[in-house]
Amino acid sequence: MNDATAFAPASVGNIGVGFDILGHTIAGPGDRVRARRIDGQEVRIAAIRGNATKLPMDAALNTAGAALIALRDALQLPFGFEIEIDKGIPFGSGMGGSAASAVAALVAANALLDTPLTRAALYPFAMTGEAVASGGRHGDNVGAMLLGGIVLSTADRLVRIAAPDAWHCILVHPEAVVETRHAREALKGAYALGDFVAQSANLALVLCGCHNGDADLVRAGLRDVLVEPRRAALIPGFAQVKQAALDRGSLGASISGAGPSVFAWFDSQAAADAAAAPMRSAFADAGIASESFVSPLNGPAAELVR
């Protein structure tokens, strides 16, 4: 193959209690990248479409381009890549847009290799791409996109976390922008040791709840005591949007990635559907229009589409 196109879905990063290490995909929105093999040993970006915010055309400064440069260099490929990016995830939305471009580019380019790599082998290159946007190598978004569903992503390992098929997420995206680098500035400062202990316990409860299909465990654990309190002020109406989800039986709700999107888990699709309008209304009360997406927690992985 000399030409391939891949699609990577949006994602919920952190899932509240798993900062930088836990994420899951969302069915629906995503980024699409077309890759071609070229004779020159370089990576170049031919086009970026669908982006309201100007994104770098210099491959080294673009998440998709940087991921492919890392792949090419590591494998010492005798050829390069030219890519076209179609953005379906808004910039600064907390929906994993920077990660999706990197993952879609890697999945497309991987199909053009003489010996394609496993998804796990693509992981470090995806983190390299993500670091261009976020300033750090973290895998909560890219790991989920590579494998699909809920994924625990450490520095060198991806672990798929199973959840009941009935469990669904609603993601509400307001018409606002929070850049990842700016959101990370809000996290500077000291933290109490007790908060780390509480967050560790909450993460363990969520993971055990997913593994056992125990909604009560998840409901007890899906409470972010470290990051959410410091970022909530960046999102107008956040407290009211979260409360709207909790009032309708959510297993828990928090900030998706760096924000401003808000996610909530439910034990059924019907319950998630019913919470959509109240959560959007809460953003409207804060003067912000929004859109919502309902998806199984066991969402899709990135895939070749052509």
Image (cartoon, helix red, strand yellow):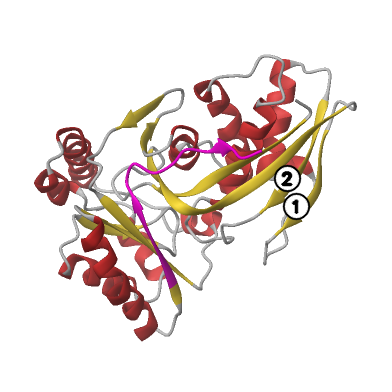
| Quarter in which the C terminus is drawn | top right
Residue type (three-letter) at the residue carrying disc 1: Pro
Q: Position of residue 238 (x, y in %)?
A: 33, 71
Q: How far apart are labels 2 and 1 at the CA level?
A: 6 Å
Residue position for label 2: 61
Picture disc at residue 56: 1
Which residue is at 73% across, 31% downward? Answer: 69
Evaluate if marks 2 and 1 touch, with contact meaning CB atoms under 8 Å apart: yes
The percent position of residue 202, horizontal first and vertical second, equals 19, 43
The 10 Å Cα crowd at callout 2, few under 14, some 14 to 19, many 20 or more, is some
Q: Is residue 278 above or below residue 208?
A: below
Q: Residue at x 63, y 47 (%)?
A: 32
Q: Is residue 279 above or below residue 200?
A: below
Residue in the foreground of this view, choosing between 300 and 212: 300
Residue 92 forms part of the magenta stretch: no
Local secondary structure at mark 1: loop
Q: What amino acid is found at the position of numbered circle 2 in the picture?
A: Leu
* The residue stretch that appears in magenta: 291-306
